[in-house]
Amino acid sequence: MNDIQNYVRKISNASDLMKGLRGDRSVHAVNHVVSIVDKEQILVSEFAARELGKICEADFVVAATNYCLLVRNPAFSGWVYQMDFLNRLVFAAKHDLPLKFEDSTETWRVPKEYHSYYREKELLPLAGTLKDNCWLIPTKVNQGCYDALQLLLTSATLRVVQITVAETHKLKLDYVAPMLFVLSQMEIKIRKLDVVFVVPPAVVDDFSVSELSGHTLPAISSVWKKNDDYRVLGFRRAGQ
């Protein structure tokens, strides 16, 4: 994982990245973040896509989105969609812009600071410094239940965000419990979970949760009732 992070940091521009995806000769670093599946060049992993999302230019995200729609590899399409969301999240943080959604007046605030972590306890030194609306972004490759969290201190709410292109997805809320525990150690009281699936606009009406688990855990049932359900918001892909 550290090797992938190092190669991502060495990639200098969108042109090199797209050369790698098209199979053209490219810089050494790019060759380590692309792979061949079913004779098509794709990013080597979900982790690589997420890391690229934090540093790449918008034009690469647009080009990668167009490319993945042609390749029609579901996993690759999902990784690029995550990359797209995270790229715009980082851009919004830098420029004090909100995140907006399709066919919705809802906007999400994005403060200039966001925090990445591998294990939840790594956030403990930030006790007393986390700001309202701040984002918490896991770097774990196999993170369950969510791709990003937003801390809404004013309403004592933790927004749980899952990004997917699929029409169905599991909701395993037990993966949220460790974060609730760490936040409690930081004297941050969460009274409600706002569970949101972010999907392409065309998927919104057909989306459903295929499997629910973890909701009976005391840590979860105290902040999320089954009848609270979940929300689905449409997020337009880059360049679409």
Image: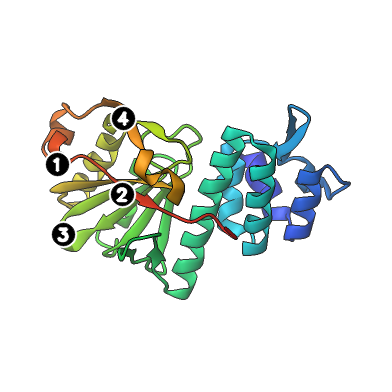
Q: Secondary structure at mark 3?
A: helix
SS for dot 2: helix
Could you tell me residue 75's position as x and y percent?
57, 33
Q: Earlier in the sequence, mark 3 or mark 4?
A: 3
Compared to residue 113, the image places residue 146 above or below, namely above
Eye-nearest disc, 2 or 4 = 4
Classed neighbour count for the residue bearing mark 3: other residues with Cα under 10 Å, few (<14), some (14–19), many (≥20):
few
Image-based side of 233 in relation to 216, left or right: right
> Mark 2 = which residue?
124
Name the quadrant containing residue 37: top right
Residue found 81% across the figure and 50% down from its top: 19
Residue picked out by circle 3: 155
Of mark 1 and mark 4, the one earlier in the sequence is 4
Amino acid type of the residue tagged 2 in the rendering: Leu
Q: Which quarter of the image is occupied by the C terminus?
A: bottom right
Q: Position of residue 23 (x, y in %)?
A: 83, 42
Q: CA distance from mark 3 to mark 4?
A: 23 Å
| N-term-proximal mark, 1 vs 2 | 2
Q: Is residue 9 left or right of residue 182?
A: right
Q: CA distance from mark 2 to mark 4?
A: 24 Å
Which SS class for mark 4? strand
For the question of whether residue 98 can be seen, the reply is yes
The amino acid type of the residue labelled 1 equals: Val
Front tag of 2 and 3 = 3
Decide which of tag 2 and tag 4 comes sooner along the chain: 2
Say what amino acid the circle numbered 3 marks: Ser
Q: Residues within 10 Å of mark 1 (few under 14, many from 20)?
A: some
Q: Residue at x 24, y 59 (%)?
A: 152
Residue bearing the label numbered 4: 172
Check the image and report above or below for 101 versus 68.
below
Q: Which mark is residue 223?
A: 1
Q: State the quadrant of the N terminus.
A: top right
